[in-house]
Image (tube, coloured by chain):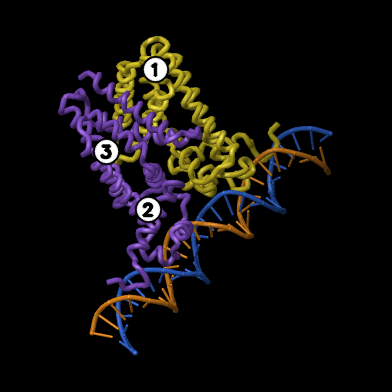
Chain colours: A purple, B yellow, C blue, D orange
Amino acid sequence: MIRGRSDGEETKSRILHNASSLFAQKGYGAVSMNEVCLAAKVSKGSLYHHFPSKDELFLHVVEEDTQKWICEWEELKSKLSGTEARLFALGDHYANDFQNPLIHALEEYARSRTLPDDIRQRLSQIYELVARVCRELLQEGMDSGYLNNMNLESCVITLSGMLEGIGRVNEITTIANTREEIRAYYRAAVQILLQGIRAGER
Amino acid sequence: MIRGRSDGEETKSRILHNASSLFAQKGYGAVSMNEVCLAAKVSKGSLYHHFPSKDELFLHVVEEDTQKWICEWEELKSKLSGTEARLFALGDHYANDFQNPLIHALEEYARSRTLPDDIRQRLSQIYELVARVCRELLQEGMDSGYLNNMNLESCVITLSGMLEGIGRVNEITTIANTREEIRAYYRAAVQILLQGIRAGER
DNA sequence: CTCTAGACCGACCGATCGGTCCAATTATAT
DNA sequence: ATATAATTGGACCGATCGGTCGGTCTAGAG
C-alpha cells in the first residue's frame, strides 16, 4: 500500500504535531510556513503537498487538538461522579492543558481578517464543542438539584469565560507560577463559581 | 511654538486614534504600518517621524487606552458606593468598553516573539493597572465585611479572568448579541461571583 | 523489466513587510 | 530677507511572507 518514498501519514502527523506546538507558543500570524518546515523537517513542497494552505493547516491543528481535549475529558469525566467533583476536574483539565493557548491563537486568527463563511462555521463549531462540555456539566448539576436553577446559558458563558480567562491571566503575569499554583487558582475559581450558583436565587 | 508645516501634535493623536481602532479590530500582527498610514492619512515618513517603530506605536496605543479606561472607571466608581454596586458597574464597564479587544491584541503581541526585558516590564505594568482595579474593589468588600475573607489574589485572578474571558467568548460566538445581552451576561457572571465569595468559607 | 503514482525537494515567484532616507515645504526666530 | 527647525511625502531597501512549479525518487503494479 505504501507507494511513496516513505509513509505519508507519518509525515503528515509530524507536521501537525510540530505546527501545533508552534501555533500554541506564538499564535497564528507569528508562525511562518518556513518555520513549520524547519520544525517538522519537511520541505516546503512537501508541506504544501499535505496541506493546501496555512489556513487549512491551522484549522486542522485546532480541530484535532480540540477533539483530543474533549476525548481526554470524557475519559476523566467517566471516572468521576457528582457535579462538584466533575467541575473541579474540569478546572484541572483546563489547568493541565498545554494546548490551551491554541484557543487564544484561534481568537487571533478569527479577528485578523474577514473570513469566508465556511471557515467561520468551522470556528463556531469548535467553540460549541467546548461550550457543550460546560453546558452538560451544569445541566446535570441543575437537574440533580445540586445547583440552583438559574439561566443555563449565562452560567455556561460565565464558566467557560472564567476558565479561559484565568489561563490568559496566568500567561500575561510573568510571575513564575508552578503548575501547582496555577491549578490552585483554577480550583479557587471553580469553588467560587460553585458556591455562587448554589447560593443563587430564582 | 508650532513650527512645522502643520500641528505635529494633531497628527500624532490622529495616528494614535486610528491605530487604536485598527489594533483593536485586527490584533497586532495583522495590522501593517501601511494600513496605519492609510487610515490616519499620513505618509510613512511622517508616521516614523512620530513613532520610531511598530512596537513603540502599539505600546503607546495600549498604554494610553488603558489609562483612559482606568480614568473612566475612577469616574464611575466615585459616583457609587458599596461593593456590590461597584462590582456590577465594573462588569458594565468591561461590557461597554469598545477598546477591550486591545487586551487580546496585547496578549497576541506578548506571545508572538521573545521580547526584551524593558518591554516585558511595560506589559506587566499595564496588566497590573487593571488587576489593581479588581484588587482594590475586592479588598474594600472584604474589609467592610460584605465579602468573606478569602485569599485575595485568587479572587483577583478569578474576577479579572472572568471579566476578560467573557469578552472573548462573546466575540467568538457569531450569534449576534446586542449590547444589552452582552451586559446581561456580565451581570450574571458578577452575580455568581459575588454570591460565591459571600458564601465562601475560610 | 517498464510504468505509474504518490511523496518529496528546493529554487523561485510576486507581494508585502517594517523601516530608511532625503528632498520639499512651511511657520517661526533673527 | 534669511536661516532654522519641525514636519511631511514617497521612493526605496533588504528581508520575508504564503504559495507555486518542475522535477526527482521510490515502491508497488503489470
Of badges 2 and 1, nearer the viewer stands 2
The answer to whether residue A107 is seen in the rendering is no
Q: Residue at x 35, y 56 (%)?
A: A56
Using the image as rendered, state which of residue A122 and residue B38 is in the foreground.
A122
The residue tagged with tag 1: helix, strand or loop? helix
Type of amino acid at the residue the image marks with label 1: Arg
Type of amino acid at the residue the image marks with label 3: Ala
Quarter of the picture holding the N terminus of chain A: bottom left
| Residue at the spot of label 1 | B86
Of badges 3 and 1, nearer the viewer stands 3
Q: Position of residue D16 (x, y in %)?
A: 53, 57
Say left or right for B103 vs B191. right
Residue A131 marker:
3
Quarter of the picture holding the C terminus of chain A: top left
Q: Quadrant of residue B10?
A: top right
Q: Residue at x 51, y 40 (%)?
A: B19
Of all chains, the one bearing label 3 is A
